[in-house]
């Protein structure tokens, strides 16, 4: 699973996908509370995965002990104590190290995670929502192949790559067909509304001379 995948870069070990996600949230939105972080994660990943207090608060404690985040205790307007989190300089550096060189493998792992979640679901009904989450990118990502290696393993790797691209092409074609249908539909709606607007528009009388203008 993407959240449990370990990413190298942290000098005393590695960071999980969930740890990277939390650190990134704290970096991009300073002064979040643990509750805020849980809400942000659930907003982004619902219904695929749900974060809980039992998962996030121990994780935040680990990040603090590793000196990757700073913690400040405040008292809110209701006189309740809260902890807010900001990323430390060390956290920024380790986040950069962890992500460097791991971005494409992360996408592969996330892709496997999504495919696992979609197993048993009607793909045709859900693909529209899936594709709407990701902008089109013409840069290939996925398994890497060696175009000089004649080993059986590499041949099988290329076969899998071809199959992936065929499936990707088919899904993009379905996406394009869906967009074409929506364009045609809304063009027809727009044409009909314009026609109705013209029919319902009140004619303005034309004044031909000053006398008629005075009596108008």
Image: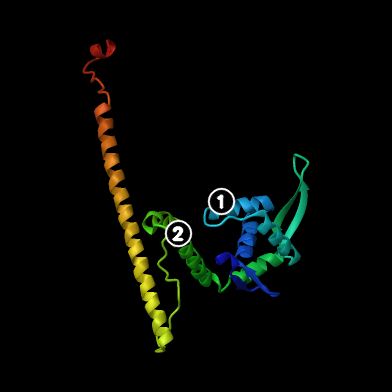
Q: Residue at 43% across / 81% down in the picture?
A: 145
| Residue nearer the viewer, 157 or 172 | 157
State the residue position of label 2. Answer: 134
Place of residue 9 in the rendered image (x, y in percent of width and height, measured from the top left)? 64, 74
Q: Is residue 164 above or below residue 121?
A: below
Q: Residue at 48% across / 68% down in the picture?
A: 112
Mark found first going from the N terminus, 2 or 1: 1
* Residue 33 visible within the image: no
Q: Is residue 188 above or below residue 59?
A: above
State the residue position of label 1. Answer: 43
- Element class at badge 1: helix
- Element class at badge 2: loop
Most distant residue in the left direction: 208
Place of residue 40 in the rendered image (x, y in percent of width and height, measured from the top left)? 60, 52
Q: Which mark is residue 6?
A: none
Most distant residue in the bottom direction: 150
| The C terminus: image quadrant | top left
Is 40 on the left-hand or right-hand side of 206? right
| Residue nearer the viewer, 167 or 64 | 167
Q: Are marks 2 and 1 in contact (CB under 8 Å)?
A: no
Is 55 on the left-hand or right-hand side of 173? right
Most distant residue in the front direction: 120
């Amino acid at each position: 699973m993407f959240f449990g995948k370990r990413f190298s870069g942290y000098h005393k070990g590695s960071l999980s996908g969930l740890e990277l996600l939390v650190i990134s949230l704290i970096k991009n939105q300073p002064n979040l509370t643990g509750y805020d972080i849980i809400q942000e994660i659930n907003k982004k990943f619902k219904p695929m995965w749900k974060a809980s207090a039992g998962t996030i608060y121990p994780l935040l404690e680990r990040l603090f002990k590793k000196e990757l985040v700073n913690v400040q205790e405040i008292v809110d307007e209701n006189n309740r104590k809260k902890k807010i989190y900001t990323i430390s300089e060390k956290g920024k550096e380790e986040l950069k190290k962890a992500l460097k060189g791991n971005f494409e493998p992360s996408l592969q792992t996330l892709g496997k995670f999504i495919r696992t979640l979609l197993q048993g679901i009607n793909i045709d009904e859900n693909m529209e929502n899936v594709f709407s989450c990701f902008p089109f990118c013409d840069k290939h990502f996925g398994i890497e192949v060696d175009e000089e290696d004649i080993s059986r393993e590499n041949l099988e790797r290329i076969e899998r790559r071809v199959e992936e691209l065929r499936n990707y092409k088919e899904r993009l074609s379905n996406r394009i067909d869906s967009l074409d249908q929506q364009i045609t539909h809304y063009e027809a709606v727009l044409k009909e509304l314009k026609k109705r607007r013209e029919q319902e528009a009140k004619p303005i009388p034309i004044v031909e001379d000053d006398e008629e203008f005075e009596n108008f």
